[in-house]
Image: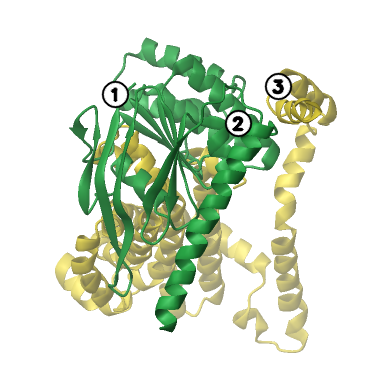
Chain colours: A yellow, B green
Amino acid sequence: MTGVALNHRTSSSDETLAPEALLAAAMVPPRRKRWRRAFAKISRYWLLAAFIIVWELVSTFGQSVNPQLDVMLPPPTALFSAAQDLWARGVLIMHIVDSLRRVLVAVGVAAALGVPLGLAMGWFEGFHRVVDPVIEFIRPIPPLAWIPLSILWFGIGDAQIEYIIFLAAFFPIVLNSMAGARDTDRYLVRAGLSLGARPHDLVFTVLLPGAMPNIFTGLRIGLGIGWMALVAGELVAAPSGLGYLINNARTIFRSDYILLGMVLIGALGLTLDRLMRHLMRIVMPWHRGL
Amino acid sequence: MARVDVAHISKVHMSVKGEPLVALHDVSFHVENNEFFSIVGPSGCGKTTLLNILAGFEKPTRGEARVDGEVIRRPGWKRAVVFQEYALFPWYTVIENVRYGLRRKRLPEAEQRRLIRHYIELVGLDGFETRYPGELSGGMRQRVSIARALAVNPLILLMDEPFASLDIQTREYMQDELLKIWQRERPTVIFVTHSIDEAIKLSDRVAIMTPRPGSVAEIKTVEFARPRDLTDPAMVRLAADVKRWLRRQVFDRSTNTIDATAH
């Protein structure tokens, strides 16, 4: 009899909420002040900041050892004045906006085509059997190799550049979406069916949410590789963009512009990845802390 | 709420190498309306395969299973399933999990809300409606799973080792809770377990299965009034009898196989 009483007490302790909530409220410290929270958010960037400071010191004081260092590795302050210069002439914002637009359009199209294709490949074995050889045949061809043909097909302009970026971003998105669909928990499929779901209900209630973490991984990788392909895309026939800025600076021997272009691509890539992670937390609230 | 007829079911699985394996051999039994029926046996005796056939997840190689005379062909809400690992949708809150089947049945919004309220209270999860399964303990997850299954008003509740992943205290508590729910709602329950004690504590009748090939060796009726005390001498005797008998069955057979291969 005592045994019953005991197990009643232990198991009811995690069922009653109200006293637990009061207890929790009493134990959790009050929220930190706003500036403290803001500081906590940016404190993670101290290593990045230290890296930039070391770079500055090396480039400035290294010139006494190697006088060519101001060309070989311009310091961040030189990049800053180069940026001010380009900004004043109104071209910097144009380069940034054009590149950003091309990457977003290309990765957007890659996602719109790649996610459904990958999910279908992961879900239908018969479809995968036929499509997989095609995908794996095209995938190893470097986006760079497509440049001549893409100019023939699309001419000179945004479409050609976006096509190169699209090719780079498409495959990681397809393959990760496919992996997500393949990981679908078959017990969840069974649970859905035994609760009266029809197959097309499962697409939105089991397949898609289950594959979501992998889809996001694919999108983040695709976005990253898209930035990598940007310079290749803007290599030959672009009138603008950060890739154009880098290529053009090469011909006029402005290494500060080259590094500025590189740094801006890095910064934009980092910012977009942060946004993706933020979006991920909004779209998948259940995934937090799992 | 329904009668189940299982008639001469056999199931042959193919191994990865393509060798046939008889998982079930000529299994027949009936489950009465409102009955709590357990299927017990050691691992590998085909009890989960049998439950999968009753749920409609697998098709029998021979024979057929009927509910109220209708042959089971595919899964559906008339035979709701409670899984060992809960199989809750991690992306849905407690409420959304319970609502899943109601929405598929296209019940009116108000009716859905009423049923959700009722079943969440029935399993004692009020206050946890907006939590995700990942935030709940094992016992609580299984309550959600039970509420979700009962809410669609199934003819039969199929339970596949529902308490096997829980610690002993929680398991015993959940058994008592399940009995209370069953006595209030009176669904027909088919309950698969490897625990003879659990089967005897809960069931009206217990089908005992033996492995290789999986078949129902005996069906025992448990006549004791509920709630049952497993420490009661008569219950202890019954459980010991079943265990001894089952051990002899499984052991004798395996020695036979050893003899056969040695020969």
Disc 3 crowd, CA 10 A, few/some/many (<14, 14-19, 20+): some
Asked if badge 1 and badge 3 are on a common chain, one would say no
Name the foreground residue: A184 vs A157: A184
User: Is there a contact, CB below 8 Å, between mark 1 and mark 3?
Assistant: no
Picture quarter containing residue B261?
bottom left
Above or below B140: residue A47 = below
Look at the numbered disc 3 and give the secondary structure of its residue: loop
| Disc 3 residue type (three-letter) | Thr
The mark nearer the N terminus, 1 or 2, is 1
| Disc 1 residue type (three-letter) | Lys
Q: Tell me the quarter of the image containing the N terminus of chain A.
A: top right
Task: Check the residue under mark 3 and report the chain it is in.
Answer: A
Reading the image, the residue beneath label 3 is: A16
Residue B176: percent from the left, percent from the top? Answer: 61, 27
Task: Check the residue under mark 2 and report the chain it is in.
Answer: B
Q: Residue at x 50, y 67 (%)?
A: A261
Above or below A151: residue A5 = above
Disc 1 crowd, CA 10 A, few/some/many (<14, 14-19, 20+): some
Q: CA distance from mark 1 to mark 2?
A: 28 Å
Reading the image, the residue beneath label 2 is: B174
Residue B129 in view (yes/no): no
Look at the numbered disc 2 and give the secondary structure of its residue: helix
Reading the image, the residue beneath label 1 is: B105
Q: CA distance from mark 2 to mark 3?
A: 16 Å
Q: Would residue A232 be found to the left or right of residue B71 on screen?
A: right
| Disc 2 residue type (three-letter) | Met
Look at the numbered disc 1 and give the secondary structure of its residue: loop
Q: Residue at x 27, y 72 (%)?
A: B18
For residue B146, the mark is none
Q: Residue at x 49, y 22 (%)?
A: B182
Disc 2 crowd, CA 10 A, few/some/many (<14, 14-19, 20+): many
Q: Would residue A218 be found to the left or right of residue A136 on screen?
A: right
